[in-house]
Amino acid sequence: MARTSASAPAPPVPVHQALWHRGRAAVRDLWIGGVLLALIVAFSIDSPYFLTRANWLNTSSTGTEVLLLAVGETFVICAGGIDLSVGAVLGFAGTAGAWVMSQLTGGQPAGAEVGVVALGFAAAVAAGLAFGLVNGFLVAWAGIPPFVVTLGTLGVATGFGFLLNNGQEISAIPGSVTTFGNDNLGGWVPVPVLITAVITIWCGLLLAKTRFGAYTLSIGDSREAVVRAGINDRRYLVEIYTLSGVLAGVASVLVMARLGAGSPASGATDNLNAIAAVVIGGASLFGGRGTIIGSVIGTGIIAVLLTGLVLINVPPFWQEVAVGVVLIAAVYIDQLRNRKTSRK
Amino acid sequence: MSARLAVRDLSKHYGGVQALRGVTLHVDAGEVLGVVGDNGAGKSTMLKILSGAVFPSSGQVLLDGEPTRFANPAAAHDAGIATVYQDLSLAGQRDVVANFFLGRETLSRNWLARRIGWLDGKAMAAHTLSELARLRTSIPDVHLASRDLSGGQRQALAIARAAAWTGRVLLLDEPTSALGVEQQQQVLDLIRRVSAEGIAVILISHQMPDVLAVCDRAVVLRLGAVAATLSGASLTSENLIGYITGAMPGGEA
């Protein structure tokens, strides 16, 4: 009948600890930034070709498609979900865009390119948007776990991509697409990199500074708390998965423009790379934590690993092995750090 | 003058199980009403009805004399009834400001920034700081993640948040059960300050000393019905225990 709780009151949080918690995300970014820097230094010492313009153009172009997927994936993972379909959606969207262009150019004179290209790009982005919407509705309204939903749409998108042209890539697209995809500013800034940079900065602000970003993180942290606060959690989940799909569509446009063709298999390895980039960048797979700058650095680590290993004459099949190992190591180190710093 | 919140002849049955049998009670503005009872007495069902989570089978809920019916928790919330559940509904990795403003964020004054949902972080932090200071909570830093606060500070944050965004009724479910002695005291002081601002507080609690310390009146539920309403000299630990266990006969005291 008397007070049953006899536990001692928890001590107040000391100031230095408070500062540490506030700076924790910054410290994490600094730490993985250091890893990226160390990789760059190591590859530069090992290979005279690493710090060259050619390698920068190659690495940054490879990085753009992974980064665009990783940016969308950051929102999904911060919201406590996962999107396994982004790579397959990239492949399908690019093939769909190329298919639209090839159909339109069939009987058209070569002069009407601009409209054809615009329609093709729009079709690719729309295909990504459609898959994002389906993912979002199934997760938010049908209540199916994101892992299952996006594993399913991974299969659907892969199949659709192959169905469009019997599993073959579609290269009958206007030549200006390829020109656009391989052009660069001042010899150093490829157009795809510029586009990706703009989108990434925009999304970084969206996640860190806006209500949409705040709800994304809060949904991933405690969906119960968000629902009880009267927030329409389902609407935001649909928007988050749709953003991921749209970015996969945009990435497919850049890949198509770089390769000069829409290929259904073009995103096959990008799933692993994008998810790894986000997790290496410090986002929690349990939701509620993550930053776009972290995902940018994570993508940098993966892109440098992919191109650097080739330059030091490691057989290219080792690339996937390296990414897989780094992913597991990053999650393990993060768990160790969390166990130390978190009181609950 | 009608009570801030009143329920009349409220009943709820789940299939054949009668959780509430014709409960009538009321709470005035600025008053703290305790609702006590053993497990299964109907406290949780009462809380769920008042917070809009379940419909009553029969009976009325009146808010300032107006009969109301909440379609969902958001409707109860919009009507000015805030609930602090035992789990507090805080997002652990989000900071104090994000939790305080969850669902009610302040947007930037710039119209363009507003359109994209740009948050006015400075204004939100300042408002959180002033609200927490006004209610004299001991939260040291509004940019701390809520999981890095102590249990008492988390409870204080949840109560301060609910009090700040509701004008009318605050429902508290076992707010002190997980706390140490000193923190229990801080939370009780906070409940008094909230009620002094004219909010009607309903405190659901197992802790008799808490009920005796802050409640103006206490309703004892037993087997889904009101066993007694105690106030003033009759609000004693012996009476509460007596009516809760059924050692004293039911009916209004």
Image (spheres, helix red, strand yellow):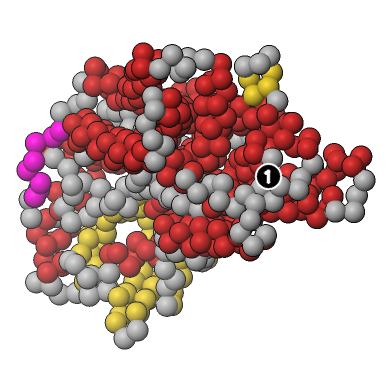
Percent x, y of residue B179: 17, 43
Instruction: Give the residue at mark 1.
Output: A261
Q: Which residue is found at the position 24% from the left and 17% from the top?
A: A16
Q: Quadrant of residue A221?
A: top left
Quarter the C terminus of chain B occupies: bottom left
Q: Which residue is found at the position 24% from the left and 45% from the top?
A: B214
Q: Is residue B248 visible?
A: no
Q: Which residue is found at the position 69% from the left and 40% from the top?
A: A260
As shown in the figure, which amino acid type bears the numbered disc 1? Answer: Ala
Q: Main secondary structure of the magenta part?
A: loop
* Image: magenta residue range: A3-10
A136 is higher (above) or lower (below) than A72: below
Percent x, y of residue B112: 69, 29
Q: Is residue A14 visible?
A: yes
Is residue A9 covered in magenta?
yes
**B32 on left or right of A84:** left
Q: Residue furthest bottom?
A: B16
